[in-house]
Image (cartoon, rainbow, N blue to C red):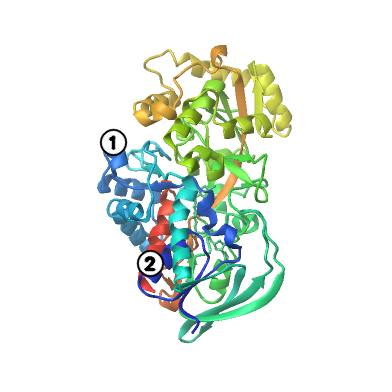
Amino acid sequence: MDADVIIIGAGLAGMSAAHEAVKRGRKVILLDQEGPQSLGGQAFWSLGGLFMVDTPEQRRMRIRDSHALARSDWMGSARFDRAEDANPRKWAEAYLDFAAGPMRAYLSALGMSWFPVVGWAERGGGLATGHGNSVPRFHITWGAGEGVVAPFAARMREAEAKGQLQLNFRHRVTALDYHDDGVEGVHGDILADDDAPRGAPTSREITGSFDLKAGAVVITTGGIGGNQEVVRDYWPRDRLGMPPEHMVTGVPDYVDGKMQLTAERAGAHVINRDRMWHYCEGLKNWDPIWPGHGIRVLPGPSSLWFDADGVRMEAPCLPGFDTAATLKRILQTGHAHSWFILTQSIIEKEFALSGSEQNPDLVAAKWKAVLKERLGKGATRAVEAFKEKGEDFVVARDLDTLIEGMNRLTPEATLDPAEIRTQIEARDAQIANPFSKDAQIMAIRSARAYRGDRLIRTARPHRILDPKHGPLIAVRLNILTRKSLGGLHTDMQGRVLQPGGQPFTGLFAAGEAAGFGGGGYHGYNALEGTFLGGCIFSGKRVGEAV
Ligand SMILES: Cc1cc2nc3c(=O)[nH]c(=O)nc-3n(C[C@H](O)[C@H](O)[C@H](O)COP(=O)(O)OP(=O)(O)OC[C@H]3O[C@@H](n4cnc5c(N)ncnc54)[C@H](O)[C@@H]3O)c2cc1C
């Protein structure tokens, strides 16, 4: 035996599992195919948003949340409808207990703290019993993704120094070592050292091999979002039609999904692989880190959203409301892009970009820096850089010139300026109407009733064609691959199950590789912040079980 536990994948789920296992006196080996510069995996790049319920941050913002409301929102979003959803549903229930219970204190004791303005992500499909967050619940960690990774990374280094944990980087697992009694270890390739910057592709040159044995093996190798071939293979054609020809990639290329296939070949059960969470607001990064690098716009509610044919999309396909419904709606045009049309006033107040590297003020974790960046003149520096250098942006003083620029970007789907103008003018006419039948204008008014949104996320309502709020801005939005919602089927201890339902002795899984718990605890829709949350929670559970 080389250790009590081998954990494959040093992302957030792997570190969370290692942390708990080490606390219980287990000797752990944590392997990763990447180098030490990538410790923390995707979580480092994240915005650090966590789904928590009924917290002091919410109460200070006068948000009344409860376990019952969060449960109702979750189940309305998940729409569990398959026999194999039994374990995912139990994981969802367990996560809700954690998120409305000890989660905040647990993370706070590790050293995390949260930006006081709680975000209102994924507002949903428009029905009280359906998808969406009834209240703001997206708690952005100070330090963004780095603020989530750092406390766990520090514990890994401490445990390593004490000899409780062995960190083996550039170790790529290619096979599980299993016999009739279950999994006994792993083997794989040692890859050449590579000092490429974090997130950039690294060499796959093999310099050796390894063979390690342990009583338990944990798979925390993440999802499939960095491997467009696998995303296309699993694409839910029955719900969304054919996968788009062009997508940008929202995760590094090590999120390759290969270990899931390796486990499946060994007899593990992968479920709900057709459930995925890709975004509609992807920008091609002008300064890419990984191949095909896309950045997601986290939009406030005011940008007008047109499909590729120039038709303004109806509710719930509004910015920040219903990711899955909007994806379906966009793809129905036969094109993979859509358009935001907005004003300078809107971009300044409402455009945020997902990812720690796009939010240096949150990473710096200083209130003053945040206020200066978010409430100062202009949009944030990261957004202004995209406006200036990003190939998806068009800026113009008048609508005709704007549309000319848009048509130059998408000659395969040109827009009729008269039709766009009619729709914008009709929407603008409703701004002065205190009643209004325009669902988006109602949504803007509802957002501004929340003081967090009014302060930093929602522009004062105005006419799009009012030159005082110009220039006009159009943004071509691409589909951006991100998360797998399905994964390895696990029971409540995180034990990987076989297709017949019996546990695969010695094999565990957590994090995105396990659909964040059970093989897909989100069902069909996510409420956001539940990915990092699910990695921490499922990793913790597995660390307590091995
Ligand atoms: C830009 C961005 C923003 C995000 N923002 C948020 C947010 O605000 N809130 C939220 O909840 N979620 C967010 N997410 C999602 C969240 O970060 C991920 O779902 C989560 O971090 C996944 O963690 P993981 O540990 O399961 O997997 P990963 O982080 O993918 O780690 C898996 C690790 O396994 C290694 N590995 C893979 N295969 C092998 C192998 N065969 N052998 C050895 N090692 C292997 C990989 O190299 C990697 O280091 C965001 C993601 C991104 C990219």
> Image height check: is 259 above or below 232?
below
If you read the primary sequence from the N terminus, does the residue marked by circle 2 or circle 1 appear first?
Answer: 2
Q: Which residue is mark 1?
A: 60
Q: Is residue 131 visible?
A: no
Q: Which residue is mark 2?
A: 20
Q: How far, Cα to Cα, is label 2 from label 1?
A: 32 Å
* Residue visible at 72% across and 68% down in the picture: 205
Frontmost residue, 311 versus 255: 255
Q: Quadrant of residue 151?
A: bottom left
State the image coordinates of residue 335 (x, y, percent, origin top left).
Answer: 64, 39
> Image height check: is 386 above or below 422?
below
Going by the numbered disc 2, the residue's amino acid type is: Glu
- 29 with respect to 189 (left or right): left
Going by the numbered disc 1, the residue's amino acid type is: Arg
- Element at badge 2? helix
State the image coordinates of residue 102 (x, y, percent, origin top left).
Answer: 28, 55
* Residue visible at 31% across and 57% down in the picture: 93
- Element at badge 1? helix
Mark 1 residue crowding within 10 angstroms, few (<14) / some (14–19) / many (20+): few
Mark 2 residue crowding within 10 angstroms, few (<14) / some (14–19) / many (20+): some
Frontmost residue, 203 versus 186: 203
State the image coordinates of residue 505 (x, y, percent, origin top left).
Answer: 43, 80
